[in-house]
Image: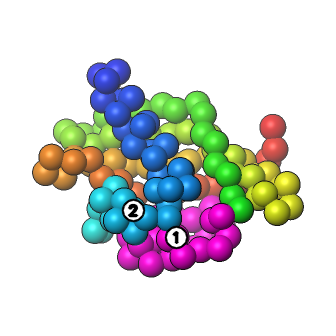
Amino acid sequence: MNHQLAKQIEDLEVLLLLPEVRRSAKRISELLADDFVEFGMFGKIYSKQDFVELLPNSEEEKFEKYEASDFKAREIAADTVLLTYKASIEFLKTNEKIWTLRCSIWQKRGKNWQMIFHQGTVIKDD
């Protein structure tokens, strides 16, 4: 796979972990496709609209810190990339940290890449 494309997709993914992006309905709307679906780490299913409405106003988001590593990108079809990685979420109020395995599917829609699918799975601490 093209290294430049892999890096571009990784950078887009990391954007969605940043507090300033997570608080912006506009940025979330730009990065998630209209038909986006997420299988959340605790079993809930989310749509783009869920995140556009919930994340910018979430008090919990103010007390969470995300870190990601071990990115692997794989082109699975023309203009479609599967990105896998490991992430931690630190809950700043309690100092609890959980680790997750993550996968996202990014697809080029027009001139922009948008996430069409995401799943997070909680794993045991390292």
Judging from the image, what secondary structure is the residue with disc 1 in? helix
Disc 2 versus disc 1: distance between alpha carbons?
9 Å
- Label total for image: 2
- Give me the residue at 40% from left, 69% from top: 25
Judging from the image, what secondary structure is the residue with disc 2 in? helix
| Residue type highlighted by circle 1 | Leu
Whether residue 82 is in magenta: the answer is no
Query: Mark 2 = which residue?
Result: 28
Q: In this view, does 96 lie to the left or right of 106?
A: right
- Give me the residue at 76% from left, 58% from top: 91
Res. 12 visible in picture: yes
- Give me the residue at 53% from left, 50% from top: 18
- Which quadrant of the figure has residue 44? bottom right
Q: Give the range drawn in magenta.
A: 38-62
Task: Residue 71: give x, y in percent of width and height.
Answer: 52, 32
Residue at the extreme front of the image, as rendered: 20
Q: Around disc 1, counting alpha carbons within 10 Å, would you say few (fewer than 14), some (14 to 19), or many (20 or more)? A: some
- In the displayed structure, 102 sits above or below 117; it is above
- Give me the residue at 19% from left, 39% from top: 78
Q: In which quarter of the image is the C terminus?
A: top right
Query: Mark 1 = which residue?
Result: 55
Task: Residue 22: give x, y in percent of width and height.
Answer: 50, 60
Q: In this view, does 63 lie to the left or right of 71?
A: right
Q: Are marks 2 and 1 in contact (CB under 8 Å)?
A: yes
Whether residue 55 is in magenta: the answer is yes
- In the displayed structure, 101 sits above or below 28; it is above
